[in-house]
Image (cartoon, coloured by chain):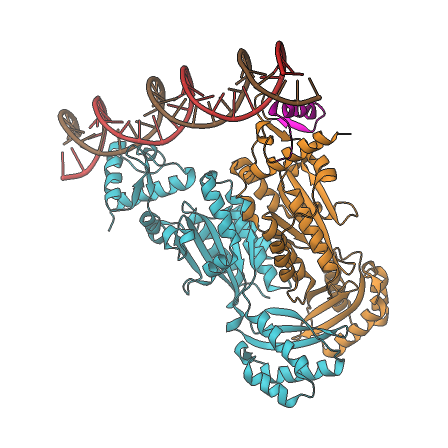
Chain colours: A cyan, B orange, C brown, D red
DNA sequence: TTTAGCACTCTTTGACTTTGATTGCTAACC
DNA sequence: GGTTAGCAATCAAAGTCAAAGAGTGCTAAA
């Protein structure tokens, strides 16, 4: 579709613009980009790339910037997905070797690492519990009117929640509950906690609705509720020149503050481990001036949640994708 | 110290400046502030208030703005701590009646309410665990090499943590642990988890260091580690005119992103329930251009943590303090 | 003690100019 | 035919300047 030299010019413009955040002039490309021709020739190429929609101009006499189509072509065809230094490899490795007890902590460390290496803001959400199986459920009495339910899923996720009662309960009751819930729920999908379970429990159990109802409700709630969103490196974005515009900065803060938007952003997306959304490719209108790269991270095939990088359209896609691919590889060798 | 009219003038200037964010002119005070005199008289008063250090000027021919001393005098002597409307009372009451199972949730709801009513950014930290007593500690086996420890303190705080082992453990061992830990730790301060406990356990117990060591370490860690910081309404601050300066906005984001700074900010402070720090009164240099109001919230005397409001020095202290006092009253009648 | 009047100060705004970077086009070159 | 030098045209950014407007401080009178 594009001849070799056009590809080179496009790549050079995208990379130069990613580096400098300034519209790229024909002159700037005559040095250090392996293009053995004059600025006039490059001007001709640029003009044609603009006609085909790969480049934009900010005004008639300005240099060129990549268009959405230009970025997309770069991401699909031109980027280097091994753009990672030895120092970065060492840093990432050491961070990922941190011993963690909870999946959430590994997700946080991973997100933090990505943010540190790429200097972009990351957003994190836990894995959807609704697709998982219940491996074990345990109840612990705390005091006389409070109980904790601990649920372990097949992917190693642990969720816990506190349940309060209006009447005293005793160890015996908790034990029975432990037995019956496990009996009915072990290795079952989460939807099982519903009518059938409720009826079974009412029939079989000796104690009252006052005890059973809050238990079922609270467990359902904690398993179905939206996962928490974590941010890393919000301030990093503010070092970028595009955030010198107050409007952009405000916009960005508003977006990060809207947790539902963030959750939708992270949960949408295709089956791919890594998805790139450039500007208007984002489903959400609010994100049209930003690019988002989402990364579903897994350990031994177990879904740990999704990490998103959110930054300017002029994002360093090579670096971001290289880092994610490397982390992906590393995590798959990790034993948890 | 200040005669009545000077107080009135100072109060009027502070309140006008809080409302408009513009330097206040002598003319602006002749209307709607109950000052029965001409602008010239007010100019004379303003001149004297400036000499005594209560007011500042941005330049020779500008109106006046309150100085740090001016704000302090206003907060100590002039503010109205019942500046709260019926709608606000209703809104706050309904929010606080939400049924919660965990202390953390109540803190979040309270912080969210404050942020909604005042339109400022709030920062939240949980109560210090180190001052609390252990009421109960329970261990739950999850699978064969994983255990959850649940710790209940005397103030009703529940902390849980996961512990992983390099060898299999069984229900019997967990039961013994339950017995022995409770035996030694019940109603004891958290410092008890230390040498004495360790030695006692090694002596008395049948199983190995491999099992006991991670348990003690992890419990210590979770009880001693800094509480998480939660932010509410970061974006709200960006509607204020002072955040139209990019420098201020960046600064603010950096501050909010520095969790240690936030933790220190919330943990410092006097025994008072409500503390006000205006500009340079803040211990931390970084906060010198902001004001912080901290609010230790309690239910029936039990410490639930600290909520901080962070905003411009031109903060609506009356509203903020009125809201906090009202919430304080409400929470003390709440039964948990 | 209060107030009217007025000169003085200083910011803000907008119009206008200059500077400099960059393009697009044309004509010559290989 | 593709490549390049040369040059006019374009436009943003920065600088200059004057006018407008808001507000004070001082003086003298009430």
Question: Total label count?
Answer: 0
Q: Residue at x 72, y 62 (%)?
A: B218
Residue B106: quarter of image? bottom right
Residue B206 visible in this rendered orientation of the protein: no
* Quarter containing the C terminus of chain A: bottom right
Q: Which residue is drawn at 63% across and 44% down?
A: B310
Q: Percent x, y for residue B13?
A: 63, 33
Above/below status of A2 relative to B247 = below
Residue furthest out toward the bottom: A203
Q: Percent x, y for residue A315?
A: 43, 46
Q: What stretch is highlighted in magenta?
A: B33-57
Q: Percent x, y for residue A250?
A: 49, 44
Residue B158: quarter of image? bottom right
Q: In this view, does B207 lie to the left or right of B47?
A: right
Comparing C5 with A169, the one in front is C5
Q: Is residue A308 left or right of residue B168?
A: left
Residue A143 visible in this rendered orientation of the protein: yes
Above/below status of B272 relative to A207 = above
Above/below status of A57 relative to B221 = above
Comparing C20 with B147, the one in front is C20
Q: Percent x, y for residue B301?
A: 79, 58
Q: Does the magenta stretch include residue B56?
A: yes
Q: Does the magenta stretch include residue B266?
A: no
Q: Is residue C21 left or right of residue B21?
A: left
């Amino acid at each position: 579709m594009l001849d070799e030299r056009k590809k080179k010019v496009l790549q050079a413009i995208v990379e130069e613009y990613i580096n400098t955040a300034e519209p790229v002039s024909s002159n700037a490309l005559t040095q250090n980009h392996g293009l053995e021709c004059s600025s006039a020739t490059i001007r001709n190429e640029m003009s044609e790339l603009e006609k085909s929609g790969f480049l934009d101009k900010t005004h008639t006499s300005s240099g060129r910037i990549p268009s959405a189509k230009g970025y997309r072509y770069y991401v699909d065809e031109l980027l280097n997905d091994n753009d990672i230094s030895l120092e970065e490899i060492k840093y990432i490795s050491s961070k990922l070797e941190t011993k963690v007890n909870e999946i959430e902590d590994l997700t946080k460390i991973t997100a933090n690492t990505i943010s540190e290496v790429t200097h972009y803001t990351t957003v994190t959400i836990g894995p959807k519990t609704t697709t998982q199986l219940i491996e074990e459920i345990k109840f612990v009495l705390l005091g006389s009117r409070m109980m904790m339910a601990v649920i372990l899923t097949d992917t190693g996720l642990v969720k816990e929640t506190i349940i309060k009662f209006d009447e005293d309960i005793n160890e015996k009751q908790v034990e029975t509950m432990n037995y019956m819930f496990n009996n009915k729920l072990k290795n079952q999908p989460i939807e099982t906690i519903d009518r059938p379970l409720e009826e079974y429990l009412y029939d079989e159990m000796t104690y009252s609705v006052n005890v059973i109802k809050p238990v079922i409700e609270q467990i359902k709630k904690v398993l179905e509720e939206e996962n928490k969103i974590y941010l890393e490196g919000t301030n990093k974005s503010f070092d970028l020149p595009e955030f010198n515009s107050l409007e952009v900065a405000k916009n960005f803060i508003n977006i990060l503050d809207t947790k539902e938007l963030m959750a939708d952003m992270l949960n949408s997306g295709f089956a791919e481990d890594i998805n790139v959304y450039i500007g208007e490719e984002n489903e959400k209108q609010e994100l049209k001036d930003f690019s988002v790269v989402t990364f579903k991270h897994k350990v031994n095939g177990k879904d740990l949640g999704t990490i998103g990088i959110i930054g300017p359209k002029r994002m360093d896609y090579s670096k971001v994708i290289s880092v994610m691919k490397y982390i992906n590889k590393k995590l798959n060798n990790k034993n948890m």
